Amino acid sequence: MKKIVFFIAALAIISCNEEPKIDYAILSGKIANPVAKQLTINSAERPIKTIEVSDDGTFIDTLTVTTGYYILSDGKNKASLYLDSGNTVNINFDANDFENTLELTGAGSEISNYLISKRAKSKELAGEGIDIYLLEEDAYKAKINEIKTASEDLLAATAGVSEEFKEKEKRNIYYTYLGFVDKYQLYHSHYSKKKDFKVSDDFLKELETIEYNNEEDFLFSSNYENLVNAHYHKEARKLAEQDSIPNDIAFLKTAAGITNETIKNKLLYVNSKNNITYTDQLEDFYTLFMSASTNEEHKKEITESYNKLKTVSKGQPSPKFENYENFNGGTTSLDDLKGKFVYVDVWATWCGPCKAEIPFLKEVEAKYHNKNIEFVSISVDVEKDYEKWRTMIEEEDLKGIQLFSDKNWKSDFVTGYLIKGIPRFILIDPNGNIISSNAPRPSSEKLIELFDEYKI
């Protein structure tokens, strides 16, 4: 505690002597039963800072901020914060009972406390897991209206919050409600196992009230941003069908027509930083992005990805995996498989879409047994999940060559292909050159067409 008092006093002295412009917030507090020696502070897009936690659980640090939302995490628990320059927020919690013990006090803690209360109330009203999406239309609308009203009541009762924030947050609450409306058909169809379910004609009528060029709301509300993103994806799917072009190319063309530059640049970027690693039309994808975006930082990052991906295009030598642990014993390297085609599946035990491909992969492996092709599955699980990896292989009776990568996502093979999402499938020819760095999944008929093309 003395350390904290001294730290704040020192800042006060500096402030009196030099009168600097305050562009930071002070975060301090104490953690009971800490699970880590550090706390991380993230913005919506990237890590901002790491704060050291003392042996007694106390911490204090400054954080340069722009007004907005941040996530504080100890690696096990997360809290949403809303910070502004000049805030002095004290954060206390028991890491073993986070939700019941989290306490925020100090100047600027009012909005963060509101956000925590809103999340808890919404969770209470929505019920457990997928229950809300199993409700029929009228009951669902009644429930999300109840959540909206409860959030509005909490906001109205929150003291110490500016009217400017309250006006923006009122709109955000409404966007949250509209987000629930927008996703109901998809979620209800999936969870209630009603494949052909469609909402009634007027169910989505409220979505017609949205204007998709409000920059202020786009920057303030992630719910509004999600609605805008969903809208332009729907428009892109129409264009893709109309012009018979891939969805990723259609989205870039659609987003290029957005008149608000801030919204356009953000949607182009968030939908391109990963999608560029999957596209089958790299040159067209890159050209469209570069001509549409006006954000130089984004263009630099996408250019770096583009240049990297050109090195793993068709006909280029494949990046190699070397001495990966083989489930059946020993190690295996890509060079060990020269003379055969190699179909690589990059996966992990925690990845749902990866596991969904397992039955199809087994079928393909059985069909091509004794052919001139090896099926290699490379796990990017972290070291602590090693036994989980071995157990799943045994329980699922996984075939082919099962390998455990040496450094999970940081493995040379994974970074060499710029893999940012899994499952990822790769086809390599008998000479070790790339046929496809983004090959069809086992569940796709196009995989067999590709095998037939190369007479495998």
Image (cartoon, rainbow, N blue to C red):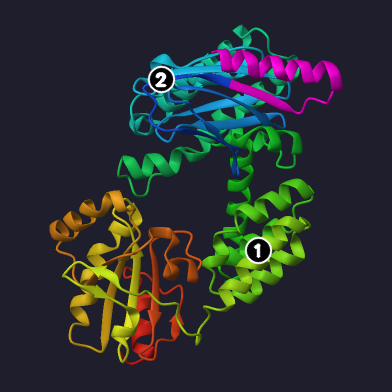
Please name the residue shown 26% across and 81% down the image. Answer: 374
Marked residue nearer the N-terminal end (1 or 2): 2
Q: Is residue 266 above or below residue 242?
A: above
Q: Which residue is mark 2?
A: 99
The quadrant holding residue 430 is bottom left
Kind of element beneath mark 1:
helix
Residue kind at label 1, given as amino acid type: Ile
Q: Quadrant of the C terminus?
A: bottom left
Kind of element beneath mark 2:
helix
Distance in Å between CA atoms under marks 1 and 2: 39 Å
The quadrant holding residue 47 is top right
- Report whether residue 411 is seen: yes
Please name the residue shown 77% across and 58% down the image. Answer: 296
Q: Is residue 449 left or right of residue 10?
A: left
Residue 308: x and y in percent read 58, 72
Q: Which residues are magenta?
A: 1-27
Q: Is residue 16 left or right of residue 428?
A: right
Label 2: how many residues lie within 10 Å, few (<14), some (14-19) or many (20+)?
Answer: some
Please name the residue shown 20% across and 80% down the image. Answer: 367
Residue kind at label 2, given as amino acid type: Glu
Q: Is residue 77 left or right of residue 397?
A: right
Residue 25: x and y in percent read 68, 24
Q: Is residue 350 above or below residue 66?
A: below
Residue 390 highlighted magenta (yes or no): no
Q: Is residue 332 above or below residue 182?
A: below
Q: Main secondary structure of the magenta part?
A: helix
Residue 248: x and y in percent read 58, 64
Q: Quadrant of the N terminus?
A: top right
Residue 215: x and y in percent read 75, 39
Checking the image for residue 142, the label placed there is none
Q: Which residue is mark 1?
A: 302
